[in-house]
Image (cartoon, rainbow, N blue to C red):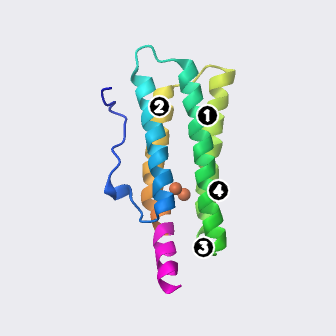
Amino acid sequence: MEKSPCEVTWDTQLLLDIPLMDTQHEELINMINTLCQICEDSEKSTKSLSLYSQKTISLTNRHFSLEERIMLLLEYPELLEHRREHREFMKRVLGETNKFYSTGLYDPELFIQYLRDWALDHIQTFDKNLSAFISAKLKRA
Ligand SMILES: [Fe+2]
Ligand SMILES: [Fe+2]
């Protein structure tokens, strides 16, 4: 299948050296890429869009709860801000999904671009800070 312009190439810039986080980030990026491909498809099916959006939401929820458990366990000082970012993102995602089901007023391209940009930015800022904290803690342990 041809690569869609909205797809993300997974590269070392996104690696945080915390294997569990990295694996889940890669899964998330792959899922967003699948959504990009569905959007590119001329016969773009609403059914597969909604199926993959649901999968992305549950994967993201699982991932956020992993990070939040780590932050709690390690008494991460930026836990509140980081968790707020996760929650605001989820609120927006659920809002868009509801719009899709209730009004049909939904632009999948824009929504997927938002997912992609948010994920890339969040991994390289909030998650990167968290991974640096985890690595420092592990070194001291
Ligand atoms: Fe995060
Ligand atoms: Fe993350």
The residue where tag 2 is placed is 35
Q: Position of residue 98 (x, y in %)?
A: 67, 30
Question: In the rendered view, does 101 fall on the left or right side of 38?
Answer: right
Q: Is residue 19 above or below residue 59?
A: below
Amino acid type, label 1: Gln
Q: CA distance from mark 2 to mark 4?
A: 23 Å
Amino acid type, label 3: Tyr
Q: Residues within 10 Å of mark 2 (few under 14, many from 20)?
A: many
Q: Secondary structure at mark 2?
A: helix
Q: Is mark 4 within 8 Å of ligand 1?
A: no
Amino acid type, label 2: Leu
The residue where tag 4 is placed is 65
Quarter of the figure that contains the N terminus: top left
Q: Nearer the viewer, mark 4 or mark 3?
A: 4
Q: Residues within 10 Å of mark 4 (few under 14, many from 20)?
A: few
In primary-sequence order, the first of circles 2 and 1 is 2
The residue where tag 3 is placed is 76
Q: Residue at 61% of width from left, 67% of height from top?
A: 70
Range of the magenta residues? 130-141
> How many numbered tags mark residues here?
4
Q: CA distance from mark 3 to mark 2?
A: 33 Å
Given contact means CB atoms under 8 Å apart, are the residues at marks 3 and 2 in contact? no
